[in-house]
Amino acid sequence: MWAGRAPAYERGFARLTSYTVGPLLDAAGVGAGVRVLDVGTGPGIVAAGAARREAVVSAIDADPGMAETARRNVPGVDVRVAVLPEVPFEDETFDAVVGNFVINHVGEPEVALKELRRVLRVGGRLALTCWRMPGSGALAVVRDAMEVAEVPWPDDIPVTPFMEYGEPEAFKELVAGAGFADAVVDEVSWEHVADPEEWWETGALARVGSNGVIISRQAPEVVARVKAAYDEIMARYAVGEGKVSLPAFALLAHGSR
């Protein structure tokens, strides 16, 4: 699903998720000299933010293309290819572990969280973001257009297993259940200003995420039907000069080992 998608992701969803980089790093106490692991680094926006704070940064991502993009964007950072729950570091290596919208892509989040706890030192901080579920606003425009166009969800593409954790109390219980103390979940919302045509190209047409993969399988007339529905939905968010302002809703969980 993500192989070869790094350039499109960097131009689209990475910009959307950049809003939470600061709050994420703050929640994990990332500053000068802090040893931090960025999990699911993607194009490296969180790793870059941590590096600007003069932290000692390592990162992992499941996709080699994403890892290579992160290496290019954040020179000097130790970026490794690894698929959660695999974390290729020794016990208690880090002072902080952060992940920006990656835990919601993990098939076994409970197992992954325990592995993240393993590589944290005693007293170290964890901070993770996930989308508020069910998805709405920026996260939902393409999916909503597919529903209007009556595009069925294929049996071979699973709905995110994280759906049940996408509300504050459930996310908090998940983190606390993995052994993190003082678990807290904050709700975060913002407005993402974007070009609707670029959002369509970098998401729906570039095969980014589940929606993009499904659209790539459709006949041209079906894609046109989805695009027409998408244009109608996007018109509701128009703010002038060919831009739209899309609301985004997320959760930020943090706790300590």
Image (spheres, rainbow, N blue to C red):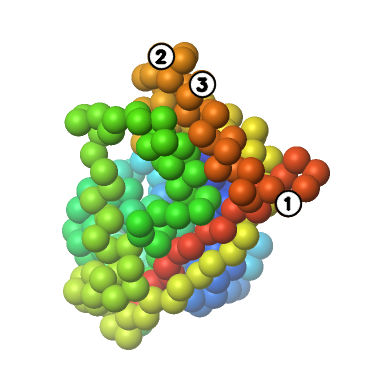
The CA span between labels 3 and 2 is 9 Å
The percent coordinates of residue 123 (x first, y second) are: 35, 82
Three-letter code, disc 3: Ala
Question: Which residue matches tag 2?
Answer: 219
Lower sequence index among marks 1 and 3: 3
Q: Is residue 203 left or right of residue 124?
A: right
Between residues 131 and 239, which one lies in front from this camera angle?
239
Q: Is residue 152 left or right of residue 94?
A: left
Question: Which residue matches tag 3?
Answer: 224
Q: Mark 3: few, some, or many residues within 10 Å (few <14, many ≥20)?
A: few
Instruction: Farthest residue to the right: give it.
Output: 241
Asked if residue 131 shows in the view, the reply is yes
Q: Quadrant of residue 23?
A: bottom right
Question: Which residue matches tag 1?
Answer: 239
Quadrant containing the C terminus is bottom left
Please tell me whether residue 93 is drawn above or below residue 172 in the rendered image. above
SS class, disc 1: strand
Three-letter code, disc 2: Ala
Asked if residue 41 shows in the view, the reply is no
Residues tagged 1 and 3 counted as in contact (Cβ below 8 A)? no
